[in-house]
Image (cartoon, rainbow, N blue to C red):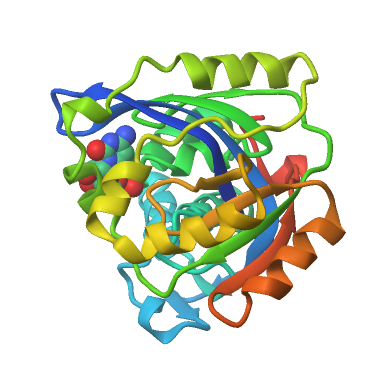
């Protein structure tokens, strides 16, 4: 039996460049893994079994289960696996929880079944599972481009504390992308500038997220939550991914905790920090 953490992500900057022939969008983003994590435990079994601490997520549709099934098929593995997923990252929140679980399941099952776990093999499987999954094979701080499959690792940032605040709504990424108009497209310059600054040792600052406006048009509750955080952390507040989780770049642990204390009565809140997953869990770094 082996357990691994599947870390959440934040998009420190995210711009949508345009629509692609395949219906997806070209994007550019700086992504960062943070210490908030699910725990995935795998062991050998006769068949494929899956359980999750959140019952609604415990079906074979779960990306972690599908990831394990892809590895099994790719290598014609006869053995099965028992996968248990302990959720801490909220689902449909913009924090990449399902994608991170999938990447962790890819890596964990290749180890379990003693099949090759190289980046070259796992990257295409990750891309089939979802646009955010390839990033989690690299983790840390990365520049992400294309549909999400072109991942360039950046050097680790100085430890940074974040406050996460989530309004009580579930958001489907595809709905937010569908609400994008051409006016929301940008040229990627802000995100490239942030990546360049971080690559030369600059401090973590917020870039822009061009999915914010379509999210706010669809869900006014997300805008209310954003404003509540922004009042406490002006110019340091952003939406992660397609939302609705809002995050603030904090000055330290105490700053983040003080914000959490003010908002915890109204919203789900967590204090978390930047992290680089162990190298054995990130074959593409
Ligand atoms: O790849 P994933 O299944 O996570 O994407 C969910 C939805 O988000 C897609 O069906 C698509 O509508 C949208 N999307 C997109 N362009 C991307 C990533 C996601 O249009 N680069």
Vertical relation: 149 (above or below) 87: above
Whether residue 7 is visible? no
Q: Looking at this view, is 155 or 66 the one in front? A: 155
In the image: residue 165, left or right of residue 270: left
Q: Quadrant of ligand 1?
A: top left
The residue shown at (19%, 24%) is 20
Q: Looking at this view, is 39 or 238 the one in front? A: 238
Vertical relation: 282 (above or below) 49: above
The residue shown at (24%, 43%) is 177
Residue 203: percent from the left, percent from the top?
A: 77, 28
In the image: residue 34, left or right of residue 237: right
State which quadrant residue 132 falls in: top left
Residue 68: percent from the left, percent from the top?
A: 45, 58
Residue 227: percent from the left, percent from the top?
A: 49, 56
Residue 89: percent from the left, percent from the top?
A: 56, 66
In the image: residue 226, left or right of residue 27: right
Q: Looking at this view, is 205 or 63 the one in front? A: 205
Quadrant assignment for the N terminus: bottom right
Vertical relation: 271 (above or below) 230: below
- Residue at the outermost front position: 231
Quadrant assignment for the C terminus: top right
The residue shown at (48%, 53%) is 96
Q: How many marks do you count on the picture?
A: 0
The residue shown at (68%, 73%) is 262
Q: Looking at this view, is 128 or 221 the one in front? A: 221
Whether residue 281 is visible? yes
């Amino acid at each position: 039996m082996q357990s691994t953490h599947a870390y959440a992500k934040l998009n420190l900057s995210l711009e949508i460049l345009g629509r692609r022939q395949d219906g997806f969008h070209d994007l550019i983003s700086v992504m960062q893994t943070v210490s908030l994590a699910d725990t995935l435990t795998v062991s050998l079994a006769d068949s494929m079994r899956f359980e999750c601490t959140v019952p609604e997520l415990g079906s074979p549709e779960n990306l972690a289960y599908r990831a394990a099934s892809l590895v099994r098929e790719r290598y014609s593995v006869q053995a099965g696996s028992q996968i248990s997923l302990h959720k801490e990252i909220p689902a449909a929140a913009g924090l990449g929880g399902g994608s991170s679980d999938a990447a962790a399941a890819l890596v964990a099952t290749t180890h379990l079944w003693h099949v090759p776990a190289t980046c070259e093999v796992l990257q295409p499987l990750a891309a089939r599972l979802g646009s955010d999954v390839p990033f989690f094979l690299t983790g840390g701080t990365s520049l992400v481009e294309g549909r999400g499959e072109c991942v360039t690792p950046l050097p680790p940032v100085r430890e940074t504390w974040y406050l996460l605040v989530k309004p009580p709504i579930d958001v489907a990424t595809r709905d937010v992308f569908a609400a994008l108009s051409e006016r929301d497209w940008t040229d990627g310059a802000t995100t490239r500038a942030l990546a360049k600054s971080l690559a030369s040792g600059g401090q973590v600052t917020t870039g822009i997220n061009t999915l914010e406006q379509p999210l706010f048009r669809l869900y006014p509750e997300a805008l209310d939550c954003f404003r509540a955080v922004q009042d406490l952390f002006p110019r340091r507040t952003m939406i992660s991914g397609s939302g609705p989780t809002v995050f603030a770049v904090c000055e330290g642990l105490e700053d983040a905790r003080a914000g959490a204390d003010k908002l915890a009565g109204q919203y789900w809140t967590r204090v978390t920090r930047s992290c680089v997953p162990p190298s054995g869990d990130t074959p593409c770094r």
